[in-house]
Every structure is written in structure tokens, then in C-alpha cells.
Image (cartoon, helix red, strand yellow):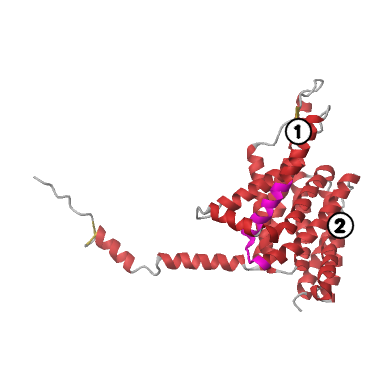
Amino acid sequence: MITVIPKAKFGNFSVKQLAAFTMANMPFDTPDVVSTTSSALSSLANDPYFVGSAMVISAAFLTTYSTTRFLKHDLDSLTSSQNSKKGTSVEMSIEPLPRTSLLTLYRFGGSFLLGLLAAPDLHVLKRIRETLSVVSDFALPALFLFVANFTNAISLDRMGISLTYTSKCAIPLMTVLLSFLLGGTKALPSLPALLSLIPIVIGVGAASWDSPHFEMFGFIASLVSLTAQSALGITSKVAINKTGLGGVDAQRAMVGVGFVLIAAVSFFQTAMFQKSSRPLVSKTEPPPAWLSLFAVLSYHVEYVLSFMFVKLVSPITFGACDAMRRLCVIVAGHQMFGGHRFSTLNLAGMAFALVGALCYSIASHM
């Protein structure tokens, strides 16, 4: 005898009838939801205010924290060991690769892998072929990206956030100079917009001045970095406009070339270390895996947003926003890692820079 299990009832409806009624009377279809979501995301990706704000926030909080912790992790470990083992020698492990090179290697290699793998589809080989096809277009901006990142890491390691960004506040002016040399007067914004860059530069410099410890090699590295960063903003826009690539694809192309460059530098430094009779660099502990991964993710997000923003605005506008990004980095770094209280000069510099940014925004839309 076969027992028939009665259907579940909801009032006078079976489960099947209720499901059919619900689907038939839904105010939207699933494809419509997907289409609406995709449209909203596309709209945000093409909104310079949203992309620029996201870039500034990611740089100020994610990248500042992860980069500083990565570079100074060994010093924190050494300090804690010395405090806990006073009167005893601290056993130190030797790293054949300087921390600044290791950071750049992780950043470029990790960002390249994310660009290949972090996608809804699994067309990795297709993305590799696409990347190889535009290498020649992005070779020059990739070189500037490598130089800017590598020398910036050296400057941060030797001088810290304060003096590094004091010297790099001249990026907007350097961008104006390079734009004029490459594109003539047609590449420049209006005179009021140009004049508004002056309080931005002065303001960021005053905001970051905090009794800095001057170190010549670190200062030279900072100057090289700001020049390369300015050139990157100009050349990357040219390459992106020529190829039509978005921020993710442009980032993947540039870090792919940058990874080859830093791998060559790292190989040379490791070989020199092995031939040297004394260690080049002495460290206590390498950065933990979570910190290395955090540094890679933070870098990837910031620079994808950065190249999305480059595509939406002029190089000089990007330089002005980059200066404001550095102001936020200074404030966030001060709050996260401490230091002297902000002086009257620091506070006045912040206000000055914000007023300059407001004036630039108004003048560039007149």
C-alpha cells in the first residue's frame, strides 16, 4: 500500500501554488535586479567625486597603516625584545633583501595576481594575452610607477611620513611643469586654477612639518619619487586613453612590468648580499603573512582607484587631488602612529590646503 503524503497548505493554497503566485506577482525580475545593480556600479565607477573620495580614503587609512606597519615591523619587534630582555643580547635574523624592496616586490607581484584572478570569470589566459598586447603602451608609465613606489618606500623607511610628504607636496607644481613641457599651454587649466595650487602646496607642507629628522638619502629618494609620481599621472592618462582600458586592466598592465623590474633589482640585491662579507640589512622578524597580504590588498585597491580617477580627470586635477590625499595621509598617520600634537602651523596648513582645494574646484569649473 502506497501512502500519499498530503501537500503542505497555506490557507487555501499549496506550496507549489503559493510559489507560482509569488513569482508571477513579484514587482521585478532577477535580470532586472542584476541590470540595475550593474548600472549603478558603472555609474559610480564613472563618477569622479566618488572614485576620488574612495581613493583618498583607501590611501589615508588602508595603505598608510599597512605600509608603515610593514616597514617598521622589525623595529617594533626589536624594541619589544629589548624591553623584555634588558641586559641580554637580542638574537637577530638576517634578511638578504631590504624591507623596502620586499614591500615593492610583494605589492607588484600580489597586485598582478589579483588583477589576473580576482574576476567573476576564469579567463586567466585571456587576461594574460590582453596584458601582453598593451605592454608597449604602458611601458613608460610602468617605469614611473616602479620608480615612484620604490623610492617612496625608501623615503618612508628613512624619514617617516612627516618629512616624506613635506617634500612631496610639490607634486601639483611638478605636474604643471611637466604638462607644460609635454603639451604646451593647451595642457594647462585657467590662471585662477593654477594660482589655487599655491595654497595647496604650502598648506600640505605646513601641515606635515613636525620637527622632521632630515636624512639626505631619504630626501633625495623623496624628490625622485615626487618627480616620477607626477610623470606617472601624465603618461598613464595618455596610455589609458589610447588603449581604452579601465582602472583594473591598466593597473594589471603596469604592475606586470613593474614586477619584472623589481624582481631584477631584488635578484641583484640578493646576489650582492651573498657575496658580501657582512650583512647588508639586519632585521629581527619578517612581516607576518596577514600584514603582507593586507599591504598587497591595500595597495591594489588604492592604485586601481587611482587609475580609474586618472581616466576621469585632467593630470593637473589629479595632482591637486593627490596633494589632498597626502594631507589625509599625514593626519591619519599621525592619529594611528602618534607623534607630537599638531601645532598651530600644522592646523593652519590644513586649513590653507583645504581652502586651496576648494578654490581649485571652483576655478576649474568656471
Name the residue that disc number 1 marks. Answer: 96
Q: Nearer the viewer, residue 66 or 87?
A: 66
Q: Tag 2: residue type?
A: Gly
**What stretch of residues is rendered in magenta?**
242-261
Q: Is residue 262 above or below residue 323?
A: above
Q: Which of 300 and 115 is in front in this view?
A: 115
User: Taking 43 as reference, is 366 left or right?
Assistant: right
Residue at horizontal 78 percent and vertical 63 percent from the top: 319
User: Taking 183 as reference, is 138 left or right?
Assistant: left
Name the residue that disc number 2 marks. Answer: 205
Is residue 184 visible to the viewer in this orientation of the structure? yes
> Disc 2 on helix, strand or loop?
helix
For mark 2, does the 10 Å Cα neighbourhood hold few (<14), some (14 to 19), or many (20 or more) residues?
many
Discs 1/2, front: 1
**Magenta-colored stretch includes residue 244:** yes
| Quadrant into which the N terminus falls | top left
> Disc 1 on helix, strand or loop?
loop
